[in-house]
Image: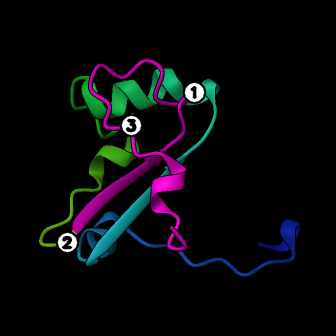
Amino acid sequence: MPALAADRATMTPRILNAARCILFLVVGGDKNDTLAQVLEGPRDPLRLLSQMIQPTSGVLVWFVDRTAAAKLARVHIVERESLDPRR
């Protein structure tokens, strides 16, 4: 990308869905409406492109902070400290 002076690699949903593990990271309250639509709303992958990601044999993991998850009806919270390998 010339404007950023960086190279770019594009991966299609077909390539991503073939991965063993796909991770999404969502941070910030400005994303809570969209995140709720993606995870709990009606399927609309033409508008919500992340809904196209459905691994064929791998796992899909969402890392979401509390503010981004604020509007989700179902939330499984794992505290950051419990993920610390030094504990």
Numbered mark located on residue 83 in the image: none
For label 1, the residue is 67
Type of amino acid under label 1: Thr
Is 87 positioned to the left or the right of 3 in the image? left
Q: Which residues are magenta?
A: 59-87
> Percent x, y for residue 2?
84, 73
For label 2, the residue is 58
**Which of the pair 55/44 is nearer the observer?**
55
> Percent x, y for residue 35?
43, 31
Q: Which corner quadrant of the image does residue 44 belong to? A: top left
**Which quadrant of the figure contains the N terminus?**
bottom right
Q: Nearer the viewer, mark 1 or mark 3?
A: 1
Is 71 positioned to the left or the right of 75 in the image? right
Type of amino acid under label 3: Leu
Q: Which corner quadrant of the image does residue 43 belong to? A: top left
Task: Residue at 65% x, 77% y: name it.
Answer: 8
* Name of the residue lying farthest toward the left: 57
Task: Residue at 87% x, 66% y: name it.
Answer: 3
Task: Residue at 38% x, 37% y: name it.
Answer: 48
Type of amino acid under label 2: Gly
Instruction: State how far apart marks 2 and 3 are (Cα).
Output: 21 Å
> Percent x, y for residue 56?
13, 68
SS type, badge 1? loop
SS type, badge 3? loop
